[in-house]
């Protein structure tokens, strides 16, 4: 069935890690004939069109800016809890008003939306949709396994998860339908946090959010993963809870036309990579959000200096104040931002030292690059477990930290040497990485399962439309 009748409202949280998969998702929808409207906060809108001007010329994509009241931007990590609360309540109210008006005017123009899709932590979006009897579905931008853990936590398993966390002797957590056990270090960090802001913000969000899903007859979660990657996790909560998880990933850019950079990429790193031999470079990035402490940065620097590999390191801030800067620049290259997908697919890449954000993980997988997993928070801990133990495409940095919570340079160096090395472990990781690369490409290819699943989802919505 053609999907030219589809007009989709796609609502995303204003962060790079959310906008990237949302844009790739929009691209898929548009290629199937749908029209996509993507509301975005004014601050990010300005950055997005400044850095990716061609995005405004894509047909059937309307990017519509609205003010969240913070037109100079808001960074949760550097603000206080009170500020964060204030921000989210403004974002929620203004976002709800804005999409209400979008839905109303689309109706008035006789081009009503057929479906609302929303990414993580936006419970207000389905609420607005329900007021209009508009179908909605969640676009889950983390692995299915993380969804399962959070879902279970808020549906009867919180004590089980918490008790195991507190009991140091018994450290395995089993959850129905998941084929592996978890240890407390693998659980999304939000569930164990004592940070009051996260507790009062994220917890009710998930409870409320899932509650809203629950009251829909057949809640649908489109997951940025693929069948072979998480076959059991995709079904773990399906059967008992009447949820339907549909894998539509990997949502990875194949060209730059839908690039969503919010920072200006540096410009000479590809030439630099071109000058390096095959599989010789370590790529280091901790995503778009997290800021490493000064001491942790120094430990990573010492690992890189001592292990002798060339490296490309994305350091978004404070590069100027970096200790050993001159030495580092002799052996490697430091950039403020790069086109990560381009870097990961470069033949000189040998491994990726990553915080295990889900986008970075999938991008690496699609390029067949093995990983050194150094998770920091949120879903990254679960992603690291999957990387090391389930897909076996990387080595995880030991959690042993000093009194300041810092992982030492020696541990990081050891992991880098294991992954980059020509020993048995390195060979096994590279072989597995290539296997997953093949499977990921198979899932995402034109006419492949991701496309088929999405087409079926769209067909079902049109069929059931009133
Ligand atoms: C956040 C969360 O932290 C992550 O755990 C969650 O899974 C998604 O949302 P972020 O920390 O930014 O995301 O990490 P990640 O998911 O890896 O996304 C970063 C994105 O920025 C990737 O798509 C990556 O390609 C891109 N990037 C990063 C660049 O394009 N250039 C860079 O220099 C660095």
Image: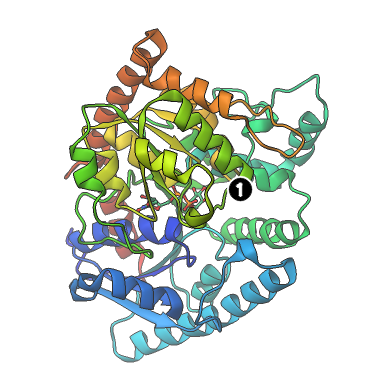
Vertical arrangement, residue 378 with respect to residue 61, above or below: above
- As rendered, which of 423 and 12 lies closer to the eye? 423
The single residue placed furthest to the top in the displayed view is 424
- The residue at the point 70 percent across, 57 percent down is 198
Residue 136 lies, in percent from the top left, at: 45, 65
Query: Can you tell which quarter of the image residue 192 is in?
Result: top right
- As rendered, which of 2 and 203 lies closer to the eye? 203
Residue 349 lies, in percent from the top left, at: 28, 33
Quadrant including the N terminus = bottom left
Residue 61 lies, in percent from the top left, at: 25, 72
- The residue at the point 42 percent across, 74 percent down is 40
Residue 382 lies, in percent from the top left, at: 56, 36
- The residue at the point 52 percent across, 85 percent down is 97
Q: Is residue 200 left or right of residue 49?
A: right
Residue at which label 1 appears: 294
Vertical arrangement, residue 106 with respect to residue 345, above or below: below
SS at circle 1: helix
Q: Does residue 389 appear in the picture of this structure?
A: no
- The residue at the point 36 percent across, 80 percent down is 64
- As rendered, which of 2 and 372 lies closer to the eye? 372
Quadrant including the C terminus = bottom left
Q: Total number of numbered labels?
A: 1
Vertical arrangement, residue 405 with respect to residue 43, above or below: above
Query: Can you tell which quarter of the image residue 227 is in?
Result: top left
Q: Residues within 10 Å of mark 1 (few under 14, many from 20)?
A: few
Q: Does residue 75 appear in the picture of this structure?
A: yes
Q: Is residue 284 left or right of residue 84?
A: left
């Amino acid at each position: 069935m053609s999907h030219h009748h589809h007009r989709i409202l796609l609502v995303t949280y204003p962060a790079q890690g959310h906008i990237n998969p949302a844009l790739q998702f929009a691209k898929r929808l548009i290629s199937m004939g749908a029209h996509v409207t993507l509301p975005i906060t004014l601050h990010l809108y300005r950055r997005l069109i400044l850095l990716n001007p061609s995005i405004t010329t894509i047909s059937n994509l309307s990017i519509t800016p609205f003010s969240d009241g913070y037109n100079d931007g808001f960074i949760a990590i550097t603000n206080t809890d009170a500020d964060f609360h204030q921000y989210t309540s403004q974002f929620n109210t203004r976002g709800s008003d804005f999409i209400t008006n979008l839905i109303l005017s689309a109706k008035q123009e006789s081009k009503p939306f057929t479906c609302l899709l929303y990414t993580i932590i936006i419970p207000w979006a389905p609420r607005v949709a329900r007021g209009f009897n508009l179908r909605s579905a969640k676009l889950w931008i983390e692995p299915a396994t993380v969804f399962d853990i959070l879902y279970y936590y808020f549906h009867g398993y919180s004590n089980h998860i918490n008790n195991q966390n507190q009991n140091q002797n018994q450290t395995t957590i089993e959850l129905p339908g998941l084929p592996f056990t978890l240890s407390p270090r693998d659980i999304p960090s939000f569930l164990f946090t004592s940070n009051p802001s996260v507790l009062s913000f994220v917890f009710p969000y998930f409870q409320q959010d899932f509650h809203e899903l629950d009251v829909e007859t057949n809640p649908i979660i489109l997951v940025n993963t693929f069948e072979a990657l998480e076959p059991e996790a995709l079904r773990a909560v399906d059967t008992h809870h009447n949820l339907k998880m549909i894998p539509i990933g990997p949502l990875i850019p194949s060209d730059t036309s839908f690039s969503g950079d919010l920072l200006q990429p540096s410009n000479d790193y590809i030439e630099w990579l071109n000058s390096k031999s095959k599989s010789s470079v370590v790529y280091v990035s901790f995503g778009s959000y997290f800021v490493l402490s000064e001491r942790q940065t120094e430990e990573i620097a010492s690992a890189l200096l001592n292990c002798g590999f060339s490296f490309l390191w994305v350091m978004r801030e404070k590069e100027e104040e970096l200790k050993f800067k001159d030495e580092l620049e002799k052996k490697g290259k430091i950039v403020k931002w790069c086109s990560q997908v381009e870097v990961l697919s470069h033949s000189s890449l040998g491994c990726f030292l990553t915080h295990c954000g889900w986008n970075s993980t999938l991008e690496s997988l699609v390029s067949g690059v093995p990983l050194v997993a150094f998770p920091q928070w949120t879903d990254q801990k679960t992603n690291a477990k999957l990387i090391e133990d389930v897909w076996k495409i990387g080595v995880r940095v030991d959690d042993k930290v000093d009194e300041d919570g810092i992982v030492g340079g020696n541990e990081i160096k050891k992991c880098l040497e294991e992954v980059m090395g020509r020993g048995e472990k390195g060979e096994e990781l590279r072989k597995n990485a290539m296997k997953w690369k093949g499977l990921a490409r198979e899932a995402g290819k034109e006419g492949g399962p991701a496309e088929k699943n999405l087409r079926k989802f769209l067909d079902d919505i049109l069929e059931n439309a009133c």
